[in-house]
Amino acid sequence: MPIVVIHTQWPHSVSEEVGKAYLEVMKKYPADRSLYKPILSACVKATKKGFKGLAIDEVKGGKLQETLDLVYRRMLMFGNLVKGLKYEIEVFMAGVEAMPMIGLQMPE
């Protein structure tokens, strides 16, 4: 199953805006368990430069494009609501999907 990882960063000064925007975004685009299984949601770390957020979702079979459509809509809205918010969306293959590409199989 593909894994979608979303990294976010924002300055300390907009943390309250981020919290409010997150609630607004999730109200408009709620989690869809038919597309993915959340592994980590809304994890936050404080740094000297601001805050970093992390979310990880395991995408269900055949649902990658639908999941990415939802994720991109969310993040575009989030970015528009909070000045200074930056994000990156990464898609990873699980080992069971990647190994056959090189002619191997994952051990049981």
Image: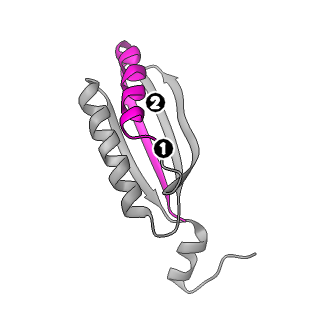
> Farthest residue in the right direction?
108
Q: Is residue 49 visible?
A: no
Secondary structure of the residue carrying numbered label 1: loop
Q: Residue, x 44% and y 64% (percent of image)? A: 63
Q: Residue at coordinates 53% horizontally, 63% vertically from top-left?
A: 60
Quarter occupied by the N terminus: bottom right
Q: Position of residue 98 (x, y in %)?
A: 53, 73
Residue in front for this viewpoint, 106 or 31 = 31
- Report the amino acid beneath label 2: Lys
Magenta range is: 1-30
- The residue carrying mark 1 is 31
Which numbered disc covers residue 52?
A: 2
Q: Residue at x 41, y 28 (%)?
A: 22
Q: Quick check: can you spot residue 42?
A: yes
| Quadrant of the rendered image containing residue 69 | bottom left
Residue 38 vs residue 3, the one in the foreground:
38
Give the vertical position of 75 relative to 95 (above or below).
above
Residue occupying image coordinates x 31% and y 29%: 85
What percent of the width, then of the height, locates residue 81?
27, 26
Magenta-span inclusion, residue 20:
yes
Marks 2 and 1, how far apart at CA = 21 Å
Question: Mark 1: which amino acid?
Answer: Ala
Mark 2 or 1 closer to N-term?
A: 1
Neighbour tally class for label 2: few under 14, some 14-19, many 20 plus, Cα within 10 Å: many
Quadrant for the C terminus in the image: bottom right
Q: Is residue 76 above or below residue 80?
A: below
